[in-house]
Image (cartoon, grey):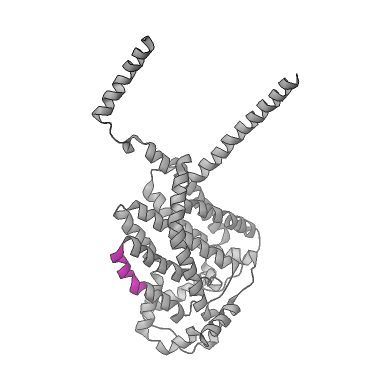
Amino acid sequence: MMERAREGVTDRDERVADRDVPRLDVWRRAVFALRPEEFMALLLYLPVAVTLAVMGGARPEALSSPASSYPGVLARLLVLLFSAALLVWVARAKPHWKLVRDAMPFVLCANLYASLHDLIRVYRAPDITGVLYRWDLALFGFEPAIWAERFIHPLLTDYFTVCYWLFYVLAPLLGLLLYLRKDFRAFRATMVSVVLCIYLGYIGYVAWPASAPRLFIPGAFAVPLHGLEILDFTRAATVAVPLTAHGAFPSLHCAVALLAVLLAWRHLRWFAWLQMPLAGGLILGTVYLRHHWVVDILAGFVLTFFAYWAGPRLEDWWSAHAGWSGERETMEDSPMRRPPASAKNVRESDETPRVAANVMES
């Protein structure tokens, strides 16, 4: 009876283990059905959504003009939830919608960016602007943003302004060119690297809030920045984004601009040469236009080189594990990906049943 009891316990343990394995399998399938940048987005969406939901019932922050026209908490929460639901639905139900899925990471990045200032307010990490200012002084003996005033000219101001706004173009354009060339391996490595860099920068914004020189030491600047009227308007428009008050460290503009050049140098050399004067103007322009401390830029470069190294490796690792579910398994298991059967293989497969029958008869 003792042996039967032990056998019963063993059988029960095996049944419990068998139930746990499928559960683990389901979770792994759910995770690896997503792409790495999609999974990163959902991880960041959760704290942002919770923060917006909590703030929705609280007294809204009084934003000064022109930031007073910024979308409210409820509107941003609804957009966030809708985009997250759309992401999961496309990944699970419409994985063949490749163009939609390939373009969504930049939409998700924009949605998160729009609400990062709420996370900064809620988590209340110490502001490090004064530290960054002192580091600039320790490195150079002067503040570069103030020193750059001697070079101010309307043409230079407009050039740096255009380069600054090209932050939203350089990396996506590189991805589009790789996509149109059907170099999907390079496209995927580029996408994961850029999104990883951006999300790490977002974490930096929340962990180390910091203001731009134009906000921290406005009285130190004696020469106004003016150029074409339309570009003056775009410079003024940055004030309408609340995050610009605390989203200086690290400099994602510089990080992503340099990353786009490095990725283009690896995958599309001619485009890297076109990017260089624009990315260089962007990096110099962040100081000239008083948006960043030099220390912000150096921290951004750390993100650049990490994302450049880690992005392709993360994509390869994720693809190797996506055999649980997702595109890699689907593509490899698809009949379209199987090599055509040769005549020799067909003859051998036809002869196999006859050989087996002869063996059984003997």
- The residue lying furthest to the front in this view is 362
Residue 161 picture location, percent across and down: 39, 76
The quarter in which the C terminus is drawn is top left
The count of marks equals: 0
In the image, residue 281 sits, relative to residue 94, either above or below, namely below
Q: Residue at x 44, y 87 (%)?
A: 149
Q: Residue at x 51, y 74 (%)?
A: 296
309 or 179, nearer to the observer: 309
Question: What is the quadrant of residue 338 in the picture?
Answer: top left
Q: Is residue 313 visible?
A: yes
Image-based side of 22 in relation to 99, left or right: right
In the image, residue 23 sits, relative to residue 265, either above or below, namely above
Residue 277 picture location, percent across and down: 34, 74
- The segment highlighted magenta reads 268-278
Residue 126 picture location, percent across and down: 64, 71
271 is within the stretch colored magenta:
yes
179 or 245, nearer to the observer: 179
Q: Main secondary structure of the magenta part?
A: helix
304 or 146, nearer to the observer: 304
Residue 190 picture location, percent across and down: 39, 58
Question: What is the quadrant of residue 137 in the picture?
Answer: bottom right
Q: Residue at x 41, y 57 (%)?
A: 191
